[in-house]
Amino acid sequence: MDKNKTLPRWDMSVIYPSLDSPQFERDFRALMRSIEDLYGLFEEFGIQKTESPPDTAAAAKTFDYVAKQLNELMESHRMLTAYVYGFVTTDSRDDFAQARLSELQKHSVKLTQCITRFTAWIGSLDVEALIGASEYAQDHAFALRKAKVDAEHLMSPVEEALAVEMRLTGGTAWGKLHGNITSQITVPVELEGETQELTMSETRNLAYDKNRETRRAGFEAEMKAWAKHALPLAAAMNSIKGETALLARKRGWESALHAAVFQNNIDIETLEAMMTAARESFPMFRRYFQLKARMLGVPKLAWYDIFAPVGEGVRVWEYDEASQFIVEQFAAYSPKMSEFAARAFKENWVDAPPAPGKRDGAFCMGVRKDESRILMNYKPAFGGLSTLAHELGHAYHNLCLANRTMIQHQTPMTLAETASIFCETIIRQASLKDADKQEQIAILEASLQGACQVVVDISSRFLFEKNTIERRQERELSVEELCNIMRQAQMDTYGEGIDQETFHTYMWASKPHYYGSAFYNYPYMFGLLFGLGLYALYQQDPDGFRARYDDLLSSTGMADAATLAQQFGFDIRTPDFWRASLSQIGQDVDLLESLIA
């Protein structure tokens, strides 16, 4: 990439002029007062677990009033939180932004306590009678039924209130420490005889370089940097996973995994069906690794070869070209999707360049109604194009959810990847259509590279987290033990497909997902395979699919995954559905093999 070519930064000024502006300060203080008012309202109406619930008519009247207040407050809270995160995630060295975030999080504790009390109160009611008596309750029927089950796994009101308060100085604080440390790491890398100080994002981006020695140098420098900073990151990991296991046990869940599965609107049967199909697919992915090794002219793929580009004369996707291509290809699906992408680029929703203090990776966050912001560290290659399309898919999902209340808006991770995978697939198929043989090889390989990350690597991360949480219940784990658990997880998934001497044993330190929600991993696999199943259906009946797709996206917080899948004829509780989606990836492996034969 031409480093002198300016990549866009996202525009937050249309929300507020600045973090220290009078407008932001006014709304920030108004939000704090609203949280206090809501807490007072909950006290007045007795919104908490009760042994003497009101009759149905009184409960319906109270629910209608209180739930509307909660929805409005949650929407304001989302906007202000997203605005502050817009500064912290792009520059963790911004002390003023960090201070505002800390202040917001402190006051948000009371909002979280209100939500917990609301769940406990719902658990005290006859939910089916409430749904029958209130149109507003009927609109939120799925959330109410879920809250009824959730309430059965709450500790006492005093314990829940304390847990929320202590999380701010516990898991949240440790997660913030991880983000601050990793975003500010500088890595000395020797390139062409000269030592350069790079950010961790820039160092990890060297994995995409054509030169194998550059990739190796970046990987070795990265591993040394993680080793240097591993001690505080291990402390964060131990603290977060210890808290996760303790709270799951205190709340009566069979395990932290059972709690996570419930929150993701699936069940253990569905998870086991998917993971069974994934395990069966590992030999297919190892065959892909062998093909890539052949293309690179090496006997076996090293870890630092996983993201290596392949093919000669491969197209370089500069950001402007990528954004134009996405707008054009989304139009082949629908004018609505294309116009939405054009709006995102025109209004500067994307923060694209790597920068000191900026968080690694990519994400999309809803800001207000149909408006989102996308953070990424853009690479001028098909992978960068694909990631941009993926995150715009999340933004399109937010568009479809715009008219839902915040309670209806609560989409689990399993379904949150639906639109992103679908949009990513649109771009991949369009890229393949007009590409020559070498470009087809590059696109297929990049797509398989992504699928490998979401199936094989996600499986390794799942195994790591499951084993870490189980072992953490007995005692803290050392840096060496965490590395050994990760090594074994990679052995069980990548196996002989990768040179085992080059396994990334510090992957637990580099992935921010471990330091937030528990089991923030398998939902990505769910999203990929569910999205591939939907795309196959779209190809069979484009017009019929379009008529139902936006409604599906708008309903992801209003039904469980199995129910929504049934509307499209899918049974996700059996391995066969997941095998069918994985077979589409297998066809790409076959095509790649034929192209390089």
Image (tube, grey):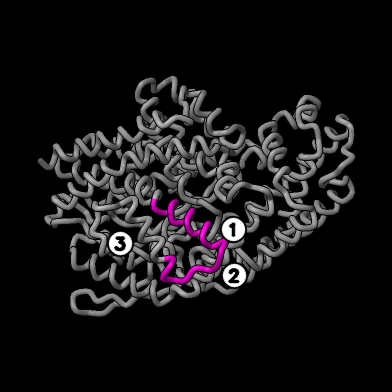
Q: In the image, what residue type sits under mark 1?
A: Tyr
Q: Depth check: give the residue in front, 570 or 419.
A: 570
Residue 266: x percent and y percent?
Answer: 55, 37
Q: Secondary structure at mark 2?
A: helix
Residue on which the image places disc 1: 83
Q: Depth check: give the residue in front, 364 or 506.
A: 506
Q: Which residues are magenta?
A: 460-482
Residue 30 left/right relative to 411: right
User: What is the crowding at mark 3: few (fewer than 14 residues within 10 Å), some, or many (at least 20)?
Assistant: some
Say whether marks 1 and 3 touch (CB < 8 Å).
no
Residue 175 left/right relative to 522: right
Residue 56 left/right relative to 254: right
Residue on which the image places disc 2: 98
Q: Depth check: give the residue in front, 28 or 558.
A: 558
Report how far apart the C-alphas of labels 3 and 2 lie in the structure: 35 Å
Residue furthest left as drawn: 597
Residue on which the image places disc 3: 503
Please report the residue visible at 55 percent of the width from the left and 43 percent of the height from the top.
261
Please report the residue visible at 15 percent of the width from the left and 44 percent of the height from the top.
438
Q: Nearer the viewer, mark 1 or mark 3?
A: 3
Label 1 vs 3, first from the N-terminus: 1
Q: Depth check: give the residue in front, 491 or 89.
A: 491
